Image (spheres, rainbow, N blue to C red):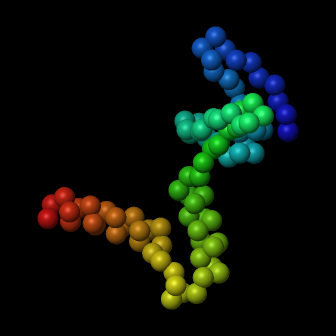
Amino acid sequence: MTYETIITSKGTITIAAPLRKAMGLKTGQKIKLSVNPSNQIVLDSGTDMRAFETLRAEVNKKIPNHLKGLSGDSLREAAASSWVAGYHG
């Protein structure tokens, strides 16, 4: 997929809707840009929490229960409880 865009006087560019959709980019999302050794711009959209937890769930299906760690919800709850206990304790 190749699209052409124009750099505005303020240095901004528009990413075509089909590219945004293909990469799962959302309005307001932060992305990282870098230049590779071939002098090409590389766009890294990272992974959001929902995508991470979906991937984690798929990986966890292959791990025996006795070897699994905490779920995403349990991790957040444990972190919140720990923070509150440390802050107020």
Is 56 above or below relative to 60? above
Total number of numbered labels?
0
Quadrant of the image for the N terminus?
top right
- Residue 86: x %, y % from top left: 20, 63
Viewer-proximal residue among 50 and 42: 42
**Residue farthest along the left direction in this orientation:** 89
Q: Quadrant of residue 32?
A: top right
Q: Quadrant of residue 15?
A: top right
Is 22 above or below relative to 51? above
- Residue 38: x %, y % from top left: 78, 34
Compared across the picture, whether 83 is left or right of 89 comes to right
- Residue 30: x %, y % from top left: 55, 38
Compared across the picture, whether 87 is left or right of 34 comes to left
**Residue farthest along the front direction in this orientation:** 37
Is 78 above or below relative to 20? below
- Residue 34: x %, y % from top left: 65, 35
Name the residue rendered at 63%, 21% in the picture: 12
Is 4 above or below relative to 22? above
Asked whether the viewer can see residue 49, the reply is: yes
Asked whether the viewer can see residue 17, the reply is: no
Name the residue rendered at 27%, 66% in the picture: 82
**Residue farthest along the top direction in this orientation:** 9
Name the residue rendered at 56%, 52% in the picture: 48
Viewer-proximal residue among 76 and 32: 32
Q: Quadrant of residue 56?
A: bottom right
Quadrant of the image for the C terminus?
bottom left
Name the residue rendered at 58%, 87% in the picture: 64
